[in-house]
Image (tube, helix red, strand yellow):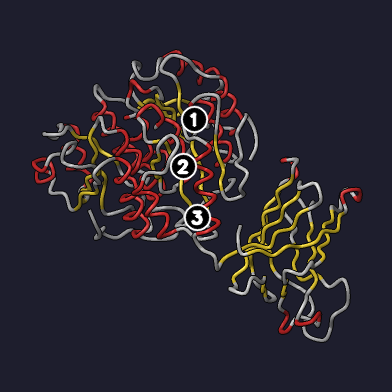
Amino acid sequence: MKRRFTKGFALGVICILVIVLGMGTTLAADHQINRFAGANRYETSALMSDYRFESADTVVIARGDVEGDYADALAGSYLAGVLEAPLLLTHPTIFYGVIEDEIDRLGATKAYILGGEMAVASSIEDALVAMGLETERLAGARRDETAKEIVLYAKESVVNGPTYLFVVNREATADALAAGSAAYYSHIPILLTYTDFVPQATEEALAELELDVVIIGGTSVVSDAVYAELEAQLRIAGDNRYQTSVLVAQVGLAEGAFADDNTYMLVRGADANLADGISAVSFGLPIIYVLEDTIPTTAAVYFEEVIDGFTHFYIAGGTAAIAESVAEAIEEALMTIAPKIGWAYIEDVDETIKIYAAIDNEDNEVVLSLGDDVDVQYDHGDALLSRSANVTVSGTKDGAYDLPSPGLNVTPECDFVEIIVDLYGDEGEPGVNGQVLLENSGTEVTFTCPDDPDLYRTYTIIVTDLI
């Protein structure tokens, strides 16, 4: 599956404190910031699925309008993760064409529908059946009962699951979404409670699951009395939803509960915009809440501590949800936060081609040794030609320097793009120990497209300590 993350850890008991093409998606200018921006929340949901999954046998369908508080969808993040399925949004009574098209593209044969017919109408189930899908509805009389049905159904497919589960307030959407990515990736159940008492459905599910309880949210949404009744082991709560999202990220990263420890999903924290982040749980990344046009202080301080020149960001939603100023602030942070990490930057005269290769040298040089693996991103003005690849450095050592000895090759899966950088050493001598040493002195780089000789180019490399 496309961009599928691998899972290779066992969760222990938590013990620390309380943007890819298609359908209108927008890519930010910086190669480390991708934005998913559909015309509405349903198209954004489909865009994320398209990016995340090459195919899927199963899809999970949940109500996506703000009136439903997204409760079923967020409880369903656990089920979707267990099934390795996209979590797609639907209007309660309207089956959007973009969702239908995405299900068709995925090649799915079964759809799980979350919630009763007030949440997802029978007409939508009929439409899924008409597409040839088998359907199964998981629903209770109330959202806490639906969460119970989802969790107990999904647990039958879990082997060696975590030792704990999340409990959130049944109306605290932001808290549930902050935990949703960990629930998806690490198969952590999510159950619902009222502020001051535990509903019977949740009590029954807890009795059957026999897992430790982690509360997400402060005492205004889950009281101390409920915490005590549940015999919870931990509360993860900030002064507001923005701080809570950062704390969930910190705890989850410490536990290995996310798919990547250097990539973040930015979601606008307003209730009306949380829908943009629901399908994003399938990425398994920490979700950090931001404001419309700024990064909250809590998140900004956190990013100052953790990001480096290789940190990647996804933005959920268009510029009406998260303004371009937020992306610009992230880009500026990436340029300045880690000055010891920079990039080899290759550009043609009309600025349509940029190639980035990581450098790890305080002297503003690219130093790579034979056998090193680095990531290279090739951005083209024609987005269809953009590529990324992992690079293995190859070439001649010491005295065996015969042009054109490739020192750095980029050959994507499509075998369409090849970048050749010759090995250089001090004063133009062959690279010592097979190192590629690119100084800021106009090293020539050859770019070839084997399938189209007309795209053959020779460029001059510029090495900089900024991205």
> Which residue is identified by label 1?
110
Whole-angstrom CA distance, mark 2 to mark 3, is: 12 Å
437 or 171, which is in the foreground? 437
Can you tell which quarter of the image residue 253 is in?
A: bottom left
What is the crowding at mark 1: few (fewer than 14 residues within 10 Å), some, or many (at least 20)? some
Whole-angstrom CA distance, mark 1 to mark 2, is: 18 Å
Whole-angstrom CA distance, mark 1 to mark 3, is: 24 Å
User: Residue 152: which disc?
Assistant: none
The tag earlier along the polypeptide, 2 or 3, is: 3
Q: Is residue 288 left or right of residue 147?
A: right
Q: Is residue 379 left or right of residue 458?
A: left
Residue 395, x across and y down, in percent? 78, 74
Residue 385, x across and y down, in percent? 75, 44
Residue 128, x across and y down, in percent? 50, 21
Q: Is residue 3 left or right of residue 345?
A: left
> Which residue is identified by label 2?
282
What is the crowding at mark 3: few (fewer than 14 residues within 10 Å), some, or many (at least 20)? few
Q: Nearer the viewer, mark 2 or mark 3?
A: 2
> Which residue is identified by label 3?
6
Q: Nearer the viewer, mark 1 or mark 2?
A: 2
Element on which disc 3 rests: loop
**Is 365 located above or below residue 196 in the figure?**
below
Residue type at mark 2? Ser
The tag earlier along the polypeptide, 1 or 2, is: 1
Residue visible at 55% across and 42% down in the picture = 52
Residue type at mark 1? Lys
Element on which disc 1 rests: strand
Residue type at mark 3? Thr
Residue visible at 60% across and 60% down in the picture = 466
What is the crowding at mark 2: few (fewer than 14 residues within 10 Å), some, or many (at least 20)? many
Q: Nearer the viewer, mark 1 or mark 3?
A: 3
Element on which disc 2 rests: helix
